[in-house]
Amino acid sequence: MEKNVGMLYAMVENNYRRLKSIVNGMTQSELDFKGTNGELNSTAQLLKHLAYVDVKWVYRIQGETLLDHLEKKYGPEVDDNGRLPSIEGVPLSSLLEDYDFVFRQFEQACQQIKDADLETRVQYADGATIKWGIWHMADHNRYHQAHINQLRKWYKESS
């Protein structure tokens, strides 16, 4: 990988490894826990959401549209009520296996990107660069790690 691409890639990789260490050993009950009032997104929902957002970014970075079978597998981003789709009973190993696939795709995409490509604009809302997209992947992951850490705390307190 080129220098700047490699630094951005490392941000995403480090956050992904940290996320995996945070969820390591979660029981199914903890994975599906939606807060003390049952109204929050569960860790399972957040993991699926992160994988979906990241796979979309991988395809944007490559200048491609997300393939239908991947949209079906990872999506939708939100349900009819504008919330993360509810999922329960999906083992942590399955969620991480799906996310590992996305991360490997991301790594392959980064191996193809040149530093000069980082300022290339991609389709996203009002527009974004590849550099911003990779940075966003890292930041978004870190953001939801805080939610997962809070859910873990509440789960332990409620058990």
Image: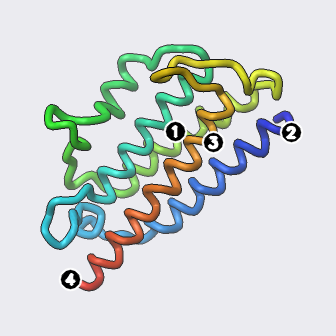
Give the residue at x 85% y 34%.
2
Question: What amino acid type should be assigned to the residue bearing mark 2?
Answer: Lys
Question: What amino acid type should be assigned to the residue bearing mark 3?
Answer: Trp
Task: List the residue tagged with mark 2.
Answer: 3
**Mark 1 or 2: the one toward you:** 2
Could you tell me which secondary element the residue under label 4 belongs to?
A: helix
Image location of residue 102, percent across then percent down: 52, 37
In this view, 69 is above or below 89: above
Task: List the residue tagged with mark 3.
Answer: 135
Could you tell me which secondary element the residue under label 2 belongs to?
A: helix
Could you tell me which secondary element the residue under label 1 belongs to?
A: helix
Between the C-alphas of marks 3 and 2, the distance is: 15 Å
Taking the image as shown, residue 154 lies to the left or right of residue 13, namely left
Task: List the residue tagged with mark 1.
Answer: 101
In this view, 148 is above or below 46: below
Marks 4/3 in contact by CB < 8 Å: the verdict is no
The residue carrying pointer 3 sits among few (fewer than 14), some (14 to 19) or many (20 or more) residues within 10 Å by Cα, namely some
Give the residue at x 68% y 50%.
11
In this view, 15 is above or below 97: below
- Report which quarter residue 35 is drawn in: bottom left
The residue carrying pointer 1 sits among few (fewer than 14), some (14 to 19) or many (20 or more) residues within 10 Å by Cα, namely few
Marks 4/1 in contact by CB < 8 Å: the verdict is no
Marks 3/2 in contact by CB < 8 Å: the verdict is no
The residue carrying pointer 2 sits among few (fewer than 14), some (14 to 19) or many (20 or more) residues within 10 Å by Cα, namely few
